């Protein structure tokens, strides 16, 4: 991507930021995120990409597990 400043073309990068525990990308870690983590840990929802990374707080596992849900819930309750 480029943007024009006057007659000069300047490259612009797109960056995706992962916030641990923010599973819906709204910038807030709350009960909604904990609910999503609970669904994913019980195989009732599938998270992909940056949302999976935000949920996978227990990096020892390659899946969303109960420890991930617990970590997201703790972050939500601390907020």
Image: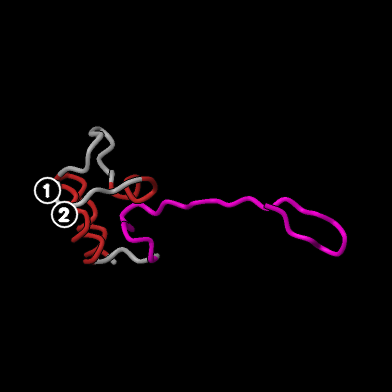
- Image position of 7 with respect to 15: above or below: below
At x 24% / y 48%, what residue is drawn? 46
At x 80% / y 54%, what residue is drawn? 9
At x 24% / y 55%, what residue is drawn? 72
Q: Residue 60, which numbered label?
A: none
| Circle 2: element type | helix
State the extent of the magenta-drawn residues as a range: 1-26
Task: Answer few, some or many: residues within 10 Å of disc 2's Cα (few below 14, many 20 plus, some between 14 and 19).
Answer: some
Residue 29 percent across, percent down from the top left: 31, 63
Asked if the residue at tag 1 contacts the one at tag 2, i.e. Cβ–Cβ closer than 8 Å, the answer is yes
- Image position of 63 with respect to 1: above or below: above
Report which residue position mark 2 lands on: 39
Q: Quadrant of residue 4?
A: bottom right
Position of the C terminus by quadrant: bottom left
Residue 13 percent across, percent down from the top left: 63, 50
Q: Residue 42, which numbered label?
A: 1
Q: Main secondary structure of the magenta part?
A: loop
Q: CA distance from mark 2 to mark 1?
A: 5 Å
Q: Residue furthest right?
A: 7
Task: Answer few, some or many: residues within 10 Å of disc 1's Cα (few below 14, many 20 plus, some between 14 and 19).
Answer: few
């Amino acid at each position: 991507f480029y943007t024009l400043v006057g007659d000069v073309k300047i490259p612009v990068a797109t960056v995706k930021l992962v916030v641990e525990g923010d599973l819906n990308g709204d910038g807030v870690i709350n009960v909604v995120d904990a609910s999503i983590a609970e669904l994913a840990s019980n195989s009732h929802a599938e998270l992909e990409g940056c949302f999976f990374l935000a949920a996978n707080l227990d990096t020892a596992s390659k899946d969303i597990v109960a420890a991930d849900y617990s970590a997201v819930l703790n972050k939500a309750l601390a907020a």
